Amino acid sequence: MKLLRKTPLFVAGVVLIATLLLGLIAPPLQPVVPAQPVASESGSAASGDIVTPLPEPPALPAAKVALGERLFKEPRLSRDNSLACASCHRLEAGGVDHRPVSIGVGGAVGNINAPTVFNSALQFAQFWDGRAATLEEQAAGPVHNPVEMASNWEQVIAKLSADEGYRQAFAALYPDGITAANIVDAIATFERTLITPNARFDRFLRGEQEALTALELKGWQRFRELGCASCHQGRLLGGNMFQKFGVLRDYFSGRPITAADLGRYNVTRREEDRHVFKVPSLRNVALTAPYFHDASAADLPQAVAVMGRHQLGRDLSHEDIEAIVAFLHTLTGEWRGKPLQ
């Protein structure tokens, strides 16, 4: 038998037959398309990679916003006319009072650190334990809390009704005048305007690469690489999920446990919710010390170190802490056209 001569035509035929056979055995390769993270209504993503700039405050009825702001600063909401919403949520100080816990009527001491009111309208729930689903529900809470305003709607409505200015303002906006529902509606309307856009990080997200320094960019990179963005995600970098405090190392061991330490367990009474809290937004975080529900971290470097240790299971290097803190300072936004301070 003579050997077949390997002519160019013979080789081409072999290649053609092999190609056809391979096509029958395996389907042709398709172009690889990167998976796209799924964004929720709050702007978060399953991967933690979708972060969008904060929007401008919504255009809400000016008269209702003005009434809500007046009520937000109104001490007559408290039993002894000494305490307003703005007493613990100081708009000139990042929306907090910088106390470990706030002081209520008659010097009553609270049991948990007051979170900032800025951008609360964009969060999926209110309070550390998420017990309020809406801003209206949240606004009613402090009025009745015995260690906060220690009042009730009957007293509040009586005091506001004695004020001609309030009677006229409510009558112009609400057919039924001064009621509990209308009070919290006005306050919540004002709070929905407390959005703080145009942070340097927002400018960076819009394409201004020069908005961040090299150290801040490194911090943003390490923030994602180390896993911080798995919980601090979406446009608020937080505020859209619950998480246990002490995922990888027990934060509460060796210390007395307070009712506030129980977190969402106080709401659900489910064992899996013990020490679970709403992940706080990191927007304007450089202005809201002290940190955590128990105010145990006095400054950002300490807070970042604690997060690394207990949430990520890492003892972060000085370089990583420095870079992440630098990045966190880029999250301070503006309110009414001026940078928050």
Image (spheres, grey):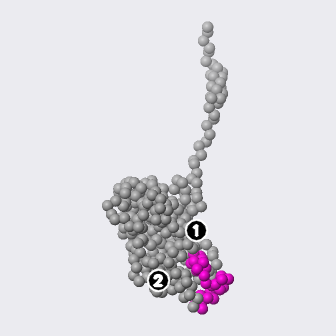
Q: Nearer the viewer, mark 1 or mark 2?
A: 2
Kind of element beneath mark 2: loop
The residue pinned by badge 1 equals 55
Figure disc tally: 2
At x 58% / y 68%, what residue is drawn? 55
Q: Which residues are magenta?
A: 163-189
The answer to whether residue 130 shows anywhere in this view is yes
Say which residue label 2 marks.
Answer: 83
Label 1 close to label 2 by CB (< 8 Å):
no
Left or right for 32, reference 283: right
Residue 30 placed where, x, y %?
A: 62, 40
Residue under the image location 50 percent in, 79 percent down: 143
Q: With 276 as the anchor, is 53 left or right in this view?
A: right
x and y, in percent, of residue 131 in the image: 51, 67
Q: Residue at (61%, 37%) from the top-left corner?
A: 29
Q: Nearer the viewer, residue 222 or 80?
A: 80
Residue at figure coordinates x 39%, y 73% from the top left:
100
